[in-house]
Image (tube, rainbow, N blue to C red):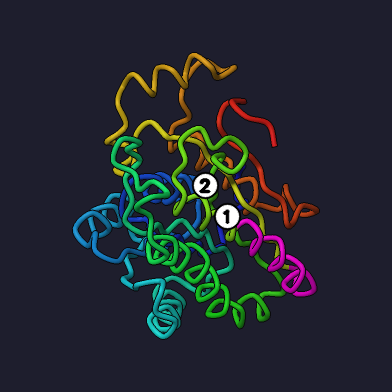
Amino acid sequence: MPDTFENQTVLITGAGRGLGAALARAFAREGARVAINYRRSAAEAEALAREIGPRAAAVRADVTDAEAVRAMVAEVAARLGPPSVLVHNALADFSFNGDARAGLDTLGWADIARQAEVAVGGALHAIQAMRPHFEAAGGGAVVTIGTNLLQNPVVPYHDYTAAKAALMAFTRTASKDLGPLGVRVNMIAGGLLRTTDASAATPEAVFDTIAGLTPLGHVTTPEELADAALFFASPWSRAVTGQTLVVDGGLVCD
């Protein structure tokens, strides 16, 4: 994909580690300037920025704080150039441990609200902060990160899945509002990834079972999911918006 992102600044939320770090490396590999947002993972984000080089910067903000996000976007524009691509990957603290999950008998509304505050609220704040840059550039792209648990809730992570379902709906409605600006908004719905901090608590036997059920015969990696984000952020998907693409090796069908 030569020169596709050469003049683009990409803001990735929750990019200090895990999938976010894989996303940052993928966009940097294709020539983009990369803003690595983090909330608490300062050391990891700064190390990743040094690894990528001068076309990357680590920027701190809690995506649930609208003012902090506006300040972050202004900092990104000053350090790397106006951002034209947003990848909303930030995730509230979560562990994919089916044995330790909150069941319906113990789940509280606050659990769902916390996940939604980061998933949907974070997307809202970032889009609002970037809108002037989208308008100035005459276009742009937003990629949100979802889950295949909507299609196949094999483990009922109620709070996480409900928030991602809301984010999918928000992705679709945002595409309608941002379309006239030339901004495309799409979602990548991943499955369990092998391996991130969030999936580190998943037993190896579960990974092996999923691999055995998947047509490609292995569990999707963060790097594979990140490559799909490149498509949605590039001109190659210029006629695609409001869509959700399941990236899980064929495990489920949307």
Image location of residue 32, percent across then percent down: 50, 56
Report the magenta stretch's main SS.
helix
34 up-or-down from 29: above or below: below
Q: Name the residue under label 2.
A: 30
Q: Residue at x 51, y 76 (%)?
A: 125
Q: Residues within 10 Å of mark 2 (few under 14, many from 20)?
A: some
Indicate the secondary structure of the residue bearing disc 1. loop
Image location of residue 229, percent across then percent down: 57, 47
Q: Residue at x 46, y 25 (%)?
A: 219
* Horizontal relation, residue 240 to residue 39: left or right: right
Magenta region, residue range: 168-182
Q: How crowded is mark 1: few (under 14 residues within 10 Å), some or many (20 or more)?
A: many
What amino acid type should be assigned to the residue bearing mark 2? Glu
59 up-or-down from 95: above or below: below
Question: Disc number at residue 176?
Answer: none
Indicate the secondary structure of the residue bearing disc 2. loop
Q: Residue at x 37, y 64 (%)?
A: 37
Which of pointers 2 and 1 lies earlier in the amino acid sequence? Answer: 1
Q: Quadrant of residue 117?
A: bottom left
Q: Which residue is drawn at 40% across and 44% down?
A: 22
Magenta-drawn stretch contains 172: yes
Q: What is the residue that sits farthest to the left in this orientation?
A: 43
Image location of residue 71, percent across then percent down: 40, 83
Q: In which quarter of the image is residue 152?
A: top right
220 up-or-down from 208: above or below: below
Magenta-drawn stretch contains 37: no
Image location of residue 178, percent across then percent down: 72, 72
Q: Mark 1 points at which residue?
A: 5
- Front one among 69 and 97: 97
- Front one among 140 and 68: 68
